[in-house]
Image (tube, helix red, strand yellow):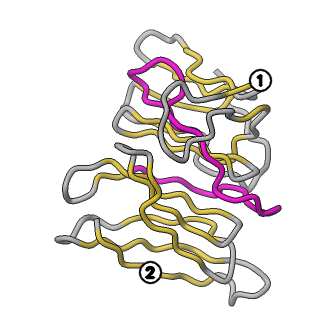
Amino acid sequence: VKSTILHFQLRNLVWATSKHDVYLMSHYSVLHWSALSGVDTELMNVQGHVAPKEKHPGSLLEGFSQTKVSTMAVKDNLLVAGGFQGELICKHLDREGISFCCRTSHDDNALTNAIEIFNTSSGAVHFMASSNDNGVRDYDMERFQLCNHFQFDCPVNGMMRTENYGASSAAIGILQGKSCTCPSFWVAAFAT
């Protein structure tokens, strides 16, 4: 199994969820490779048309074509892939088809830089996506709804969320750009 990465600045295109399970991009396919069986399985092919089978408010039922994946995350039986044009594609690994598709922005510079899947203090599954459109978005995965949208003065190249502390959490991110003191960091607090 060979991973293919379209650009040297892309990140998180290979994920190990256990010592036996690896998820990776290979050309236009997201693959699962089992170290136990030595078998790779295609989970999603984004070269052609990808559209959600489930209906959720805010989901683009028409989906996307020829998505170039820039980052992804895999955790808790959920795979989220982000694209060069702000695409977000969500798939539950225990279900057939795609669960949710959306575009974070129609900005020319909407490349998705990083995605993190996490559990809130109530146990709900969320994910955060940072992008070159200067935004970080927090989505509730049960309802596939945008919960928080943080805007900054520069592209957000990466972020990570802290552990839960009571009813609120914090995320830290890396900003980099001509209008920022490079690199700079931010912290955002939000209720979970």
Q: Amino acid at mark 2?
A: Val
122 or 16, nearer to the observer: 122
In the image, is 65 to the left or to the right of 74? right
User: Which numbered tag is attached to residue 102?
Assistant: none
Q: Amino acid at mark 1?
A: Gly
Viewer-nearest of labels 1 and 2?
Answer: 1
> What crowding class fits label 1: few (fewer than 14 Cα within 10 Å), some (14-19), or many (20 or more)?
few
> Residue tagged by mark 1?
48
Q: Which residues are magenta?
A: 90-117
Where 74 falls versus 162 (above or below)?
above
CA distance for labels 1 and 2: 38 Å
> Residue tagged by mark 2?
187
Q: Quadrant of residue 151?
A: bottom right
**Secondary structure state at the residue bearing disc 2:** strand
Q: Is residue 40 magenta?
A: no
The reply to whether the C-beta atoms of the residues labelled 1 and 2 are less than 8 Å apart is no
In the image, is 171 to the left or to the right of 61? left
Where 52 falls versus 171 (above or below)?
above
Residue placed at 60% from the left, 84% from the top? 184
The C terminus, quarter of image? bottom left
Where 165 falls versus 57 (above or below)?
below
Q: Position of residue 162 (x, y in %)?
A: 33, 67
Residue placed at 63% from the left, 77% from the top? 175
In the image, is 57 to the left or to the right of 42? left
144 or 126, nearer to the observer: 144
